[in-house]
Each structure stands twice: as structure tokens, then as C-alpha cells.
Image (spheres, grey):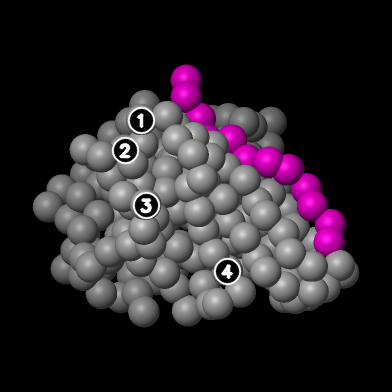
């Protein structure tokens, strides 16, 4: 069964460093998303991406964040200058064109900012 | 902003029993979805119920939706130890793609 994959599974970085989290959505999906979950808290929407542009973003997704689909398979989230409060599990999700409402999530990347 | 809020926060039952989790939300929705999350893992989509549906089944899962009360319930019948996980409801606003998740119900099923 096709699934969303994410790399790396864990990343430790120093405050102020740039990180890139990578995702490979399900191959025929057209909508892509990033969410995050701070430890012990609920999953929060960051951004959605369709047709090579951001379709919606939350207040969390400020200028420090960017997304890119550099090729036909990868979808990345970049945090330019990480802060301690960026420590969280980051989930990528994708959905297909006809049933775009059902989002399929990857296993997540656990980011720890020191 | 609208958010799903589940209750109870935690539920402990024995194998074979049924587990019922509830979700309430605040504003109108297109649909409501339930997800499962095993400890430290990703979210697994369980079921989606649209705003014009009242009940939906999938295997041992039964979901109801009452839009007049802005609430939904997830029933897991004949629970198994493997059902131990956190369960989240997520609402889909009318205006966009973002899913709004609740804080979840932590279910423990003991053998």
C-alpha cells in the first residue's frame, strides 16, 4: 500500500541553524501539507500546497518557514533559523485530487533544537 | 477557530469491551475525520464522515455525527490490545484544507 515517507526520522540541531525536512508524498497525490505536534500537545496545521504554490497557511507558518516541491516526488519544509520552540514532531501529509479531504500522514520527523 | 475536542482524555478498558470516544466542535464543517496515533508514530486515517451523513461504519468502527449538537462519537467494538493508541478527531472547515485536530483520547486496552 502506498504511503507517505519522511526523512530523517530524527534531527538534532543548534538554535539558529537551518533545517530541511523532507517528505515523499504518495505518488498520485496532488495536495501536500505540513503539520507539527509539540510534545504533549495537539497536532497543528502549518501549510498546504497545491499546484506548486501555497494554498493555505497558519499563523505559525511565518517568514522562517518555507516549502518547496523541488522535483516530482519530494516536498520539503525549511526552517531558516531554528528556535527552541520549533522542537516538535513534524508530519507531512498528502491527499489525492478527487478525494482531497482524506489526508494521509507520514511517520513524522522529530526535531530537537538545542 | 474551530477545533475538535475529544472526551474522555483517557480511557482504560479490557479486551473485548467497547470503547466510545466523543468529539465536539464549534463551527460548521464539511466533514469530520478520526485518526489514530500509536505512541510516537504518525497519524493513521480511520474514517471520514461528511456533514450530511449521520452514521458510518468501517469494520469494528462506528462513527456518528450530530451536526445540530456539533458532536461526533467513535465506537470501537470488541476492542483488542492492538487498539491501544491515541484517537483524534479532526474537523475540516468549509473554507480551506487545514485539518483542526483535538487533543485526543488516549485509549488503553488491557488483555
* Residue A52 numbered tag: 3
In terms of depth relative to the viewer, which is nearer, B57 or A88?
A88
N-terminal of the pair, mark 3 or mark 4, is: 3
At 69% from the left and 31% from the top, the residue drawn is B111
Q: Are marks 1 and 2 in contact (CB under 8 Å)?
A: yes
Q: Decide if residue A69 is in sight here.
A: yes
The residue at which mark 1 appears reads as A28
Q: Secondary structure at mark 2?
A: loop
Tell if the residue under mark 3 belongs to the same chain as the one under mark 1: yes
The residue at which mark 4 appears reads as A65
Q: Are marks 4 and 2 in contact (CB under 8 Å)?
A: no
In the rendered view, tell whether residue B98 sits above or below residue B19.
below
Which residues, given as a range, are shown in magenta? A1-13
N-terminal of the pair, mark 3 or mark 2, is: 3
At 86% from the left and 67% from the top, the residue drawn is A14
Quote the CA–CA distance across marks 3 and 1: 15 Å
The residue at which mark 2 appears reads as A96
Q: Secondary structure at mark 4?
A: strand
Quote the CA–CA distance across marks 3 and 4: 16 Å
In terms of depth relative to the viewer, which is nearer, A104 or A8?
A8
N-terminal of the pair, mark 4 or mark 2, is: 4
Q: Decide if residue B43 is in sight here.
A: no
Q: Secondary structure at mark 1?
A: loop
Q: Secondary structure at mark 3?
A: loop
Amino acid at each position: 500500500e502506498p504511503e507517505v515517507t519522511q526523512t530523517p526520522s530524527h534531527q538534532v540541531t543548534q538554535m539558529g541553524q537551518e533545517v530541511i525536512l523532507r517528505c515523499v508524498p504518495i505518488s498520485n497525490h496532488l495536495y501536500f501539507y505540513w503539520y507539527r505536534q509539540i510534545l504533549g500537545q495537539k497536532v497543528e496545521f502549518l501549510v498546504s500546497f497545491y499546484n506548486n504554490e501555497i494554498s493555505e497557511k497558519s499563523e505559525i507558518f511565518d517568514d522562517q518557514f518555507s516549502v518547496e516541491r523541488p522535483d516530482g516526488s519530494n516536498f520539503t519544509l525549511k526552517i531558516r533559523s531554528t528556535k527552541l520552540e520549533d522542537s516538535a514532531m513534524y508530519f507531512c501529509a498528502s491527499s489525492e485530487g478527487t478525494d482531497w479531504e482524506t489526508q494521509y500522514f507520514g511517520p513524522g520527523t522529530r526535531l530537537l533544537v538545542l | 477557530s474551530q477545533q475538535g475536542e475529544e472526551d474522555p482524555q483517557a480511557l482504560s478498558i479490557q479486551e473485548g469491551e467497547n470503547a466510545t470516544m466523543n468529539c465536539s466542535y464549534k463551527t460548521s464543517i464539511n466533514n469530520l475525520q478520526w485518526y489514530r496515533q500509536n505512541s510516537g508514530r504518525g497519524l493513521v486515517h480511520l474514517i471520514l464522515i461528511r456533514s450530511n451523513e449521520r452514521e458510518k461504519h468501517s469494520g469494528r468502527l462506528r462513527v456518528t455525527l450530530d451536526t445540530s449538537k456539533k458532536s461526533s462519537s467513535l465506537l470501537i467494538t470488541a476492542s483488542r490490545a492492538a487498539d491501544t493508541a491515541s484517537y483524534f478527531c479532526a474537523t475540516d472547515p468549509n473554507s480551506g484544507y487545514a485539518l483542526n485536530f483535538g487533543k485526543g483520547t488516549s485509549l488503553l486496552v488491557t488483555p
